[in-house]
Image: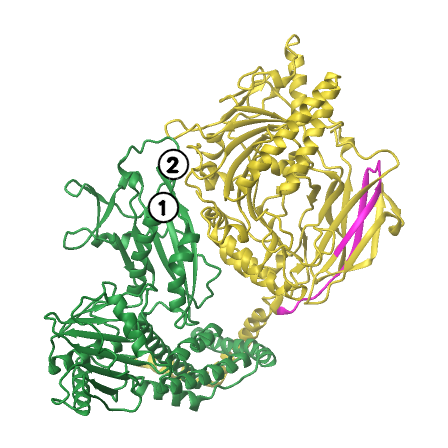
Chain colours: A yellow, B green
Amino acid sequence: MFKCCLHSQLQFRSETSLESDHLMGSREPIVLIFLILISTYESSAKGGIAEELNEEFTEGLLLRPLPDRKVLAHFHFQSSVPPTRIYGRHHHLFPKSIYQLVNKFRVREMELSFTQGRWNYERWGGYDPISSSSAKPPGVELWADFDVPLDQVDDSWRNLTHALSGLFCASINFLEHSTSYSAPQWSFHSFAGKLRYGTLPREAVCTENLTPWLKLLPCRDKAGLSALMDRPSIYKGYYHSQRLHLTSDDFGTAKSNAGTMLEQTLTVVLQPNTLGARAMVSGKTLQPSWSLNSLFGRKVHGKCSVSKSSNVYVQFEQNLVSELKEVRKKSEAPESGILIHDDFGNNTIFEMSASPDRVVKEVENLQKEDSSILLEFLVEDYNDSKPFDLGLRWKLPVVWSCQQAPLHASRFLMGSGNERGAIAISLKSLSSNNTPTVGCCEKGSQLRINIFQVVPWYVKVYYHTLKVFIDGELQSTMENIEKIHISPSEDKVSPGVMEMILRLPCGVITAALTLEFDKGFLHIDEYPPDANQGFDIPSAVVSFTDFQASASFEDNLLNKLPILNELQERKHVISYTEVLLVPLTTPDFSMPYNVITITCTVFALYFGSLLNVLRRRVGEEERRLKSKGDFK
Amino acid sequence: MIYPPPLNLVQFSFLAISEQYLSILTQTPIRLINYRFRYRSPPPFREIDDLSTAIESSPILFPCHFRAVFVNFDPNSYTADQLSISVQAHMAKFAAKNSPACGTCASNVTVSVTLDSNSNCISNGNNVDWKCGALNEFKFAEKHEDGLLDEDFASLLDNNSGAKVYTVVAVKTEQEEVRAVVGKYRHAWIMGRIFEEEAIEKIAEIFVNVFMNGGKEEGLIHGEFMPLGADGRIVLSFNLLNADPHNWIYDWDFQEIDENLLSPVIDALKPLADVSVESQVLYHTPKSSFSFWDDRLDSYIFSTKDLPFFVNSNEWHLDTSVAAGGLSKILQFVVYVPSAKECPLQLQLPNGEISTTNGFISPMWGGIVVWNPSACLTDSKIKHPLRYKISSEDSRKLFEVFMGQLRQLFGLKSDGLFVGASGTSILLASERGFSEWELDVLSRQHSCFNLLQCGTTLGSLSRLVQSLPRMIIMDDIGKQVKYSLEAARLTLSNALLGIYDASAGMFYSSAIWMDCN
């Protein structure tokens, strides 16, 4: 951890030095910065060693206005513990259950996410770190990497799914069957054969999954930022994804001191309450104003007492920042200074209810003109008598769009009928839609796209029918595929897995992959309760390996915060496609009942009339009636 | 005239026939499927029945060996055989008072007696290895420390044969006060001016009530509810609860506690159970009931009748432990640090006094100790809570209480005194928490109750299978039934030979297959 830390610091410093060099045009600052760099390195090294011997818990919340009048709230909690051989096995902050889980199943890395709703890549962004790490497929996604011999990996996986299922009150144990999980070789995360990946697209996520997740936090939802998690407010949002990411170094042969780290995030997209009619200014609708209280119905009453830091950030994206500048220029020509020097508490475009304690600016990349801005608010100074309620009120209408992934990935089904069909994955460039995309690669080079797709066995994919279309034209398949790995499905044993690296020319507008399949037949036992609804094909994972979704901030090096680290972590741009719903031939489950009832009716009618015929004597009855009449 | 068909009849026959058809149409294929995938392996009914009747008909009693050594008594008044018979008679009298509980010694006890006086040394029985005259140089007039004396006796009585022999040494001295002490090993001694009859009665009482029954009294936890998992494992889960971390946050050095205070106890319990320890610190864990302020005692009072509402199962999430499988037993030990609003918090006994340990136990669940921080009375209006560490002195005190609670949960006494009909005996506390004779008592009880449970479980399984001939028993379950039957038989025969250490360990049999069903 320390090495990696140092590395990023160095990199970061070199970037700033370049920039300042460029700005000032003299040599002295470089020397100065170099000195600072050395001194900070030394002090952080000392601080690092002292810190490593202790457990740590931090909490953070990132809020970001979204272009479509919604607000993204991203809670981030991190607990870390030094390795067992140094620190021992008794902890005062790290959750006991997770520590035991890691040690019992020898988990090296694990990620579990519960998601409801679909991340809207077009509107909410597809290039930033949050969309790459916290936009997850609907339902449950679990992957884990084990530090056990290869032949025990499956057993560990099965036990882990059962343990997690109990821990999180979810049906994760359905992932124990070999038909429901797969072992990606290289495309998903590169671990040598010890990684298992499984999804449950239809798992409903609700508060019973959130409560055990909150139990892992030392303050649960009693204090600190997690106190904002009012269940009705969270679950009425458009998207929520609760995630748990675990890394452990306890079993590694390398004597690193990273220990075990548990990262918990909750990402929600909420619609602020706009009471009454939408506010209009000069014919345009204003963005909705919001506050923590209006979003969550609660306020923050101070930080969690055991947390090391507790900060709230408001992020203005790069496009929004440039838009703000534009608006500023238009409205008041003389004051067209750079936004960063402005008063963020109250300016002509928006107003914050509290002034930020710090403004963190993203370090500009060469390609970007403006960079995103983070406003930092410290929760520490607030308490019960003075709760923290951050509000943002827009004064002028602003329109912007999010940064998009290089290509927008979607997936759909083709064909009709219950016999066969085709899966198509389409990749579309959004640059035509007048939205600025990330600068693609240079002319002549190629765009590499990694696709990982798991298909259940009852959808029998014919992988030889793989076709690649680029800009609507059929291409020779092998020319555009750099690497491919296919493990065909085996009936009732394993799902089909396809991993490939696709190479596309740079200026591509649309690209599509199609695969034909036959629909299989299931045994009557294997149908789920509502079989007529259809069967889910889990999301495909599309990652753009040439692009890094990371932002580096000009942050004070000495107090690196996990939530900023998460944003700065170098990751590929990843997007998940939609879940597909395949209707399979389902038997008419009511047929036996229908047959029984019809047969029985026929029998009953037959026997009834037969009995009537046999037992009734018409003549006798008439005689009796007559005799009755005679009496009268 | 045309009569409508009798409607009732039609409906009735429809129902009847449809039911029949349903059964024909639906059940047959399912039954066929079942037969295709599952196998039937009938359990050995006869053997199971034999075993369960053998266990249920007579209580399982273990053979025990006792030895009484009389030092400095007049060798002419009684012979060794007379003394032996007399002790046995008294033992029978004491044993008759309480019905033979599970895990006690058989009635046909053997008591070997040695008479050691200055002049001669007589003993009956063959396996007596008392070193005659060993106490001749002993200065009885001086005051001796019990712990050192215990070690002295241990070296004197050290027998390498491995058999478990319980010894009481009665020494006649000139001291007025008669002092009876039960040591940490398998012996006790009585010293003072004492006569034979008196000594015989006291010896018999120590044999029966202490060595055989573990010094139990009414009101203590019954042996059947010993907190031991069916697989012989216990997880001791220690929790430090900070009721309100806004006031103060306490932490402990559990690593040190684990190494220094708990590991000897775990080692001591090893023959009985596989104990593992885990710990956690929790925050925001208020108790669920209220306490009231008492001016006289200058503290908040929580009375005994409210104790059932002390544990707040909504907020105290103590339960999860991956380490404990389905059959292990978890004992929770909780240190409760009250918030500033209720500090100092004292538990009040029914007689109005304040509990000295400030803690309580809940059988089969664990124990709770309220620990009042010393910062209690100082100003609590601190903006940022302070972090403290419970000092090692305080944590040692806390864990002494926990050890007492653990002993109580096992049904043993925690006050170190045995009050019998013939006077009070001191029970020496072992630094390892449990003395050897106590562990013997626990092993015997554990084996006995496990055997009983195994017998009833297997017996009811056999009855169930016999009454439901169509019940399908998978092959591996059948195998486990056979295995557990074998284990039970082995344990039974071992128990009759007196090897109960081994038998305690191998008793996961009854559990195994409960798991399978």
Q: Classify mark 1: helix, strand or loop.
A: loop
Q: How many marks?
A: 2
Q: Residues within 10 Å of mark 2 (few under 14, many from 20)?
A: few
Check the residue under mark 2 and report the chain it is in.
B
Q: Which residues are magenta?
A: A498-524
Rendering coords of residue B381 (x, y %): 32, 31
Q: Amino acid at mark 2?
A: Leu
Q: Is residue A264 visible?
A: yes
| Label 1 chain ID | B
Decide whether residue B143 is among the magenta residues: no
Q: The disc labelled 1 sits on which kind of residue?
A: Ile
Q: Residue at x 18, y 86 (%)?
A: B119
Quadrant assignment, res A131: top right
Res A592 → quadrant:
bottom right
Judged left or right of residue A542, residue B466 is left
Q: Name the residue beneath numbered marker 1.
A: B390
Q: Residue at x 57, y 53 (%)?
A: A203
Q: Kindly identify the residue that appears in the image at 73 percent across and 26 percent down.
A: A368
User: Label 2 vs label 1: CA separation?
Assistant: 13 Å
Instruction: State the SS at label 2.
Output: strand
Magenta stretch: includes residue A501: yes
Please determine whether, in this image, residue A529 is positioned above or below residue B354.
below
| The one of A587 and A502 positioned closer to us in this rendering | A502
Q: Residues within 10 Å of mark 1 (few under 14, many from 20)?
A: some
Q: Which residue is mark 2?
A: B386
- The image position of residue B420, as x and y in percent, is 16, 72
Between A340 and B82, the residue placed more toward the observer is B82
